[in-house]
Amino acid sequence: MSFRGLATTTLKSAAVVTAAGAACVAYAAAIEVRWFTLRRVTVPVLPVGTAPLKVLHLSDLHLMPAQEKKIRWVNELARLEPDLIVNTGDNISHPDSVLPLLRAYGALLDVPGVFVFGSNDYWKPHFKNPAKYLLPANKQRHKPHGPDLPYEEMRSAFTAAGWADLNNERSTLKVNGLRLDFAGTDDPHIRRDRYAEVAGEVDPAADLSIGVTHAPYQRVLNGFVGDGYPLVLAGHTHGGQLAVPFYGALVTNCDLDTSRVKGLSTWGFEGRQAALHVSAGLGTSPYAPVRFACRPEATLITLVPKAGETAG
């Protein structure tokens, strides 16, 4: 092949690669980021002889006031008739998002629920260099946070609806005749977690004990599992947000490994194990409104009796 022919072929190849890259970016920004999906998983953690319990895990809406498609989609989740809502934070991204958020949750606020906050419940997001997101969590340098968001207004609305505030708190709910004990932490990603304030062995009198946090950092997971919690729920990771098909996520934005970036897995510590569910969430930062090979999601978790047990 002549030099001219080689140059022409190279330019054509570059053009094809550029066009393919542009198409992927357009898809990630215009289609997948709004292509909401409901995941379903089953977790055997209930006592023998009890009926299944439906838990709706919501996380990382990062709601902007004009996101009507997201508002409608979340509002329609009430048709699932969940028994319990677990909200793992980062609900809003704008000072005017609280009322649209309450409209999105709608009838879900009438269901027993618990919640923790993430950083974007407290502070308005600001622009970050996207390349820094690819760094390990311990190498990232966080800029000073943006202006405060109306998190106390949101907290008051949630607690007025009967949802339990688990930000470094414990709580107990009676759901379908079952005693459910909870412990939660405030956001570990911004080091607001105070696990020592909720630490201690689970009460064997509870039918189920659940740990709840926004960001699944190992120090918090180890605390819950070490204290005997059989189920831990978290969000924050966005499922990696940009994944490579047939490979998976590149980052988790915390010290969790990428094999557990979303969905159901097992976390072990000091000879104990727990089911860990990490939600990929329903939104993104308004400064990085893209998802690729990682659809925005909510999860319906069906809790069922533990396998292999017999009535005593």
Image (cartoon, rainbow, N blue to C red):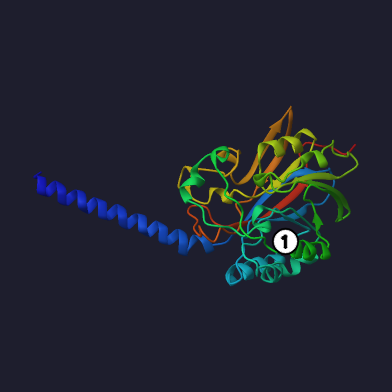
Q: Quadrant of residue 79?
A: bottom right
Picture coordinates of residue 42 (x, y %)?
69, 48
Quarter of the C terminus within the rendering: top right
Residue nearer the viewer, 104 or 184: 184
Residue 86, position as x, y percentages in the image: 74, 54
Q: Is residue 303 above or below residue 77?
A: above
Which quarter of the picture shows residue 264? top right
Q: Residue at x 70, y 71 (%)?
A: 99
In the image, residue 221 above or below residue 153: above
Q: Is residue 8 left or right of residue 189?
A: left
Question: Which residue is the site of mark 1?
Answer: 151
Q: How many marks?
A: 1
Q: Using the image as rendered, state which of residue 126 and residue 67 is in the foreground.
A: 126
Can residue 32 be seen at all in this image of the molecule?
yes
**SS label for mark 1:** helix
Residue 228 point in image, percent of width and height:
80, 36
